[in-house]
Image (cartoon, rainbow, N blue to C red):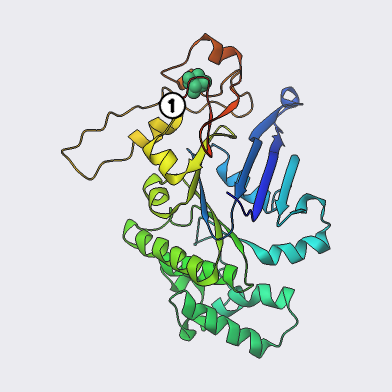
Amino acid sequence: MDEILIEIQNLKKYFPLKRGIFSKGLYVHAVDDVSIQIPPRRIFSIVGESGSGKTTFGRTILRLIEPTSGKIIYKGRNIMNLNQKEMMTFRKKMQIVFQDPYNSLHPRRLVKDIIGEGLSIHEKISSGQILERVKEILKKVGLNEDHMFRYPHEFSGGQRQRIAMARALILNPEFIVLDEPTSALDVSVQATIVDLLIELKNTFSLTYLFITHNLAVVDYISDFVAVMYLGQIVEMGSKDDIFNSPSHPYTYALLSAIPDPDPKKKRSRTIPRGEIPSAVNPPEGCRFHPRCPYAKEICKRSEPEIVEVSKGHLVKCHFPLR
Ligand code: SF4
């Protein structure tokens, strides 16, 4: 990776546990020392089970949730040092589309107001000009001007996600966090929304951080992939590195759970033992050791370093798979 749009360095987000006097001093380690780099105009996916910290990570890098520590460097500038006013300028460039199109759109506002709101906050232009811009952006997401004067409940889930994309795009962003944008949709419309996201990325030269648990979509859409487990990245590389040569036992287990469309091909399925442990008290040593079929004594005591198994392919494991 040469040119970098956004770089995250050692990002942490710990939430204090507020449950009775015995929980004093306890924290949920939602994001724990995560570093990534995303080049411009690429799709970087973060995958992991629910509870892995991927959604908190996406929100923290936009400072919708304030990080505990770390650096967020956007085009060479650490946005952690910006005050609220300075942050407003960056907000235009960094947008988010949420998972649930049913709750993320205000139910009592017309579509034109939902989409145009960002413009009325950030730009000094007339209501007529805002309407023109809303009209234009609706066309780009596959809707039309008649839709401007309707309410969100009059639309299907897929159409609502198109409205959410229009709301994000109207400020001409460069970077969008897509937080499980298809998981609340019917399977039949998921593919059309994924294709729309790719088309919009190419039209507007966008960079995406794509957060999901759907590995089939990740395989289809991504340039780079990071696998998250209990607040940490355990493997990261190009899409081919992750899908063709998975080296962390957790990645291997996730991939083995994808059904193969060819019934003649038998894939040996590796299911991690037990449940994902609590992020309040993550296991010592390697956090995956209680579930890992390859765990050895050292894994219980010593946290693995991140090693580069091939150029740009990073793995946090004492015994990467080959
Ligand atoms: Fe498994 Fe040990 Fe690697 Fe952790 S460090 S993933 S326990 S082999």
The vertical placement of 239 against 75, above or below, is: above
Quarter of the image for residue 168 reads bottom right
Figure check: 42 above or below 67: below
Residue at (49% x, 52% y) in the render: 180
Q: Residue at x 41, y 66 (%)?
A: 158
Is the residue marked 1 within 8 Å of ligand 1, measured from its CB? yes
Where 129 sits versus 111, above or below?
A: below
Residue at the image point whose x is 50% and y is 78% from the top: 138
Position of residue 106 measured from the top left corner of the image (x, y, whole percent): 58, 68
The foreground one among 157 and 172 is 172
User: Is residue 119 in view?
Assistant: yes
Dot 1 crowding, Cα within 10 Å, few <14, some 14–19, many 20+: many
Residue 262 or residue 245, whichever sits in front: 245
Residue 150 appears anywhere in the view: no
* Viewer-proximal residue among 170 and 153: 170
**Residue lying farthest bottom?**
128
Left or right of residue 85, residue 143 in this image: left
Q: Is residue 92 left or right of residue 265?
A: right
Badge 1 element: helix
Residue projecting furthest to the top: 297
Residue denoted by label 1: 249
Q: Amino acid at mark 1?
A: Pro
| Residue 177 location (% of width, % of height) | 58, 56
Tell me residue 88's x, y (percent): 76, 64
